[in-house]
Image: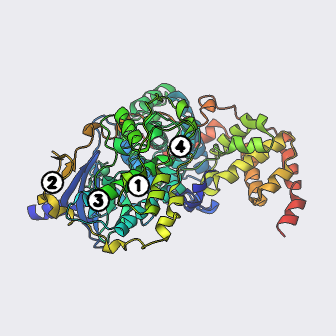
């Protein structure tokens, strides 16, 4: 982890779980529950990842885009900020701020290609307008830290270099939750290593102790990740569609 | 009614009272304004939206992104950002003048302690950037703005980047040529904060000489000028030099002593300069180390910023005479006199970096585009994991966190 995390706006902007799990009044009025809220954010995370695969950007850009999307929804409602427009716009802005610009027209092209559903369609102009609104909602804080950078080194140090693919995948999955809004990325990374080491039956107790981090927090994050995997299996397309339907946007 | 309309349009975003234009930036106009909420005088940069329909200007976004992370007395403050009529506006604290104007003003005498003060503030701002892993990459007197109480602040972060990962590769086409470090001129793609320190050394030298120190007419000539001053580097001085992409062997020239180059400077100043001008970026002094150099702690202390000599505020400087040294031209965009810069239009020499897409950074590109499949965990795994999670660390935890 780069040393500047400790003085970053990312650290200052970290929230409590209770602050993240707030359904905005406008959304509540449409019958959106906390579960729906989480489900839609999960769906949009998948959407961003899929789009990113097509326009070929680094995982880091995906991670930043998802973080932007989740941050916006701590401040703005889904009623006002249609997820189906916000998600690609976040990817557009993240690509730019992570120095791997993607053209808006390319996004529009792939959205049309991979989502036949008309309600996902959007125009270049809409993405550009949304970009400005995202910037405002983010209070122009654009630097986001992720667990990826320190991962290979930590794994090597823990004698787990062979588990890079597994751990990398678990880190990717953490963006399907709101962890990045709540915990410092290095702790998320450690939690993922923890889950991976248990999964690989590798006893890393001594190594974790040497790190002198609060293992309670790491353990709690690991538990959340496991709970998520557990719940994940019960999610059906119908549930997602029902939640999106409540929003009833883009008629 | 018309009067009211006019009044309303003058007040930007219901808050700022627009005043005169201060200058034309690369990506927008900068105008003076009064913040009616606080009464503060500010400078507002209106970001032009490109014709290419690519939303918020890439360079502006970079500047916003980094300045939001950098809050320091020696770095320009980005007070606010807001969209207005589809354009993004950046609100900065208002700065009266810049270091280029100070150096150029023949009516100003810079004492050794004045120079010490200016270079100390420059290094302080730089040290903060580097501590936060930000490279400025466009250090030059024109981008060091001076506030109403004499405070010098780093500005213009449109070229700056975060250098977090050591194996990141950057473009070497940064900095105005005269401030470019030798590793950049040899095409280095992996470089660090040393490039900013070299530029700061050039600024230090410029404060002493009152003219740009190394005025190369091309990249090759720039290296020639550097070697003519300090001597062609020997491999022992800079072992990695010969491996740089654009390395070519230069004919050996002996170079001059720092004492000859800067006859008026103190021994401490020369010692610091020689360390900032070290050829090998690995051996070059860091901004933080430079601040701890005895040049700043011994001898007469740096002048208080408020007491520093500076030219009259910009609005009065329009009728000031061109300086007597070096070639000057009247810039077509402003009535301010400007020094001729080599290849002015391509000053930053980065063309597509400023407008078009930037090269992707390479960290973890090995994993790009083929993210590993998400691990699936079945319920048996989960029970197993949960048990382990609950059991492990129980004892050491109790030991460590009583
Ligand atoms: N904070 C400020 N206070 C006063 N004038 C400013 C300020 N920022 C910029 N300017 C004026 O606007 C000009 C262009 O701004 P700058 O940020 O340097 O753009 P560029 O990227 O083109 O160099 C400067 O040369 C200066 O004259
Ligand atoms: Mg400038």
Inspect this view and state whether residue A78 appears: no
Q: In this orientation, which residue lies closer to the viewer: A202 or B119?
A: B119
Badges 1 and 4, same chain: yes
Which sits earlier in the primary sequence, circle 3 or circle 4? 3
Q: Read off the residue under disc 1.
A: B259
Q: Position of residue B355 (x, y in %)?
A: 35, 37
Taking the image as shown, residue A61 lies to the left or right of residue A212, namely: left
Few, some or many residues within 10 Å of mark 2 (<14, 14–19, 20+): some
Residue B213: x percent and y percent? 33, 48
Say if disc 3 is inside 8 Å of ligand 1: yes
Say whether residue A232 is left or right of residue B184.
right
Q: Which residue is more in the foreground, A152 or A175? A: A152
First in residue order: circle 1 vs circle 4: 1
Judging from the image, mark 2 belongs to the subunit labelled: B
Q: Residue at x 51, y 66 (%)?
A: B294
In the foreground, A236 or A109 = A109
Q: Which residue is mark 2?
A: B322
Circle on res. B98 = 3
How packed mark 4 is, by other alpha carbons closer than 10 Å (few <14, some 14-19, many 20 or more), is: some
Earlier along the polypeptide chain: callout 3 or callout 1? 3
């Amino acid at each position: 982890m780069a040393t500047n995390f400790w003085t970053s706006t990312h650290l200052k902007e970290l929230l409590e779980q209770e602050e993240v799990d707030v359904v905005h009044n406008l959304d509540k009025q449409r019958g959106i529950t906390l579960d729906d809220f989480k489900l839609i954010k999960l769906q949009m995370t998948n959407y961003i990842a899929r789009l990113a695969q097509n326009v070929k950007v680094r995982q880091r850009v995906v991670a930043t885009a998802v973080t932007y999307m989740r941050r916006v929804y701590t401040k703005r409602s889904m009623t006002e900020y249609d997820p189906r427009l916000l998600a690609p716009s976040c990817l557009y802005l993240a690509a730019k701020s992570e120095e791997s610009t993607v053209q808006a027209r390319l996004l529009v092209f792939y959205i049309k290609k991979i989502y036949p559903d008309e309600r996902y369609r959007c125009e270049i102009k809409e993405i550009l307008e949304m970009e400005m609104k995202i910037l405002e909602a983010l209070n122009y804080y654009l630097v986001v830290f992720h667990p990826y950078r320190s991962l290979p080194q930590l794994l090597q140090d823990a004698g787990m270099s062979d588990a890079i693919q597994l751990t990398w995948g678990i880190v990717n999955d953490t963006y399907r939750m709101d962890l990045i809004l709540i915990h410092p990325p290095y702790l998320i990374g450690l939690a993922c290593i923890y889950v991976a080491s248990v999964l690989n039956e590798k006893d890393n107790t001594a190594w974790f102790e040497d790190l002198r981090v609060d293992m309670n927090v790491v353990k709690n994050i690991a538990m959340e990740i496991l709970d998520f995997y557990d719940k994940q299996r019960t999610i059906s397309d119908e549930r997602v569609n029902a939640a999106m339907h409540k929003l009833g946007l883009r008629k | 009614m018309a009067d009211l309309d006019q009044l309303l349009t003058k007040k930007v975003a219901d808050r700022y009272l627009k005043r005169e234009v201060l200058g034309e930036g690369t990506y927008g106009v900068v105008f003076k304004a009064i913040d009616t909420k606080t009464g503060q005088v500010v400078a507002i940069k209106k970001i032009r939206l490109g014709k290419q329909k690519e939303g918020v200007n890439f360079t502006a976004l970079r500047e916003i992104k980094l300045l939001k992370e950098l809050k320091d007395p020696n770095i320009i403050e980005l007070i606010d950002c807001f969209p207005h009529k589809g354009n993004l506006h950046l609100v900065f604290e208002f700065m009266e003048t810049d270091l280029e104007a100070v150096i150029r003003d023949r009516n100003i005498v810079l004492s050794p302690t004045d120079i010490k003060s200016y270079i100390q503030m420059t290094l302080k701002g730089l040290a903060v950037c580097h501590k936060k892993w930000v490279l400025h990459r466009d250090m030059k007197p024109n981008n060091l703005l001076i506030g109403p109480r004499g405070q010098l602040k780093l500005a213009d972060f449109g070229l700056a980047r975060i250098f977090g990962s050591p194996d990141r590769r950057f473009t070497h086409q940064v900095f105005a040529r005269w401030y470019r470090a030798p590793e950049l001129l040899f095409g280095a793609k992996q470089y660090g904060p040393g490039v900013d320190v070299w530029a700061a050394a050039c600024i230090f030298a410029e404060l002493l000489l009152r003219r740009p120190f190394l005025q190369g007419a091309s990249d090759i000539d720039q290296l020639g000028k550097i070697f003519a001053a300090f001597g062609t580097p020997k491999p022992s001085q800079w072992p990695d030099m010969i491996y740089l992409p654009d390395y070519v062997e230069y004919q050996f020239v002996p170079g001059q002593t720092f004492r000859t180059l800067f006859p008026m400077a103190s021994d401490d100043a020369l010692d610091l300069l020689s360390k900032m001008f070290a050829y090998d970026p690995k051996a070059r002094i860091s901004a933080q180390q430079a601040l701890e150099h005895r040049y700043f702690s011994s001898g007469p202390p740096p002048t208080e910023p408020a007491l520093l000599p500076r030219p009259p505020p910009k609005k009065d400087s329009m009728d000031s005479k061109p300086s007597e040294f070096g070639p000057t031209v009247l810039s077509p965009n402003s009535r301010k006199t400007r020094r001729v810069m080599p290849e002015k239009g391509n000053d930053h020499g980065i063309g597509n970096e400023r407008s078009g897409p930037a090269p992707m950074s390479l960290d973890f590109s090995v994993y790009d585009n083929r993210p590993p499949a998400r691990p699936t965990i079945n319920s048996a795994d989960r029970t197993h994991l949960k048990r382990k999670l609950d059991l492990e660390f129980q004892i050491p935890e109790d030991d460590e966190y009583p």
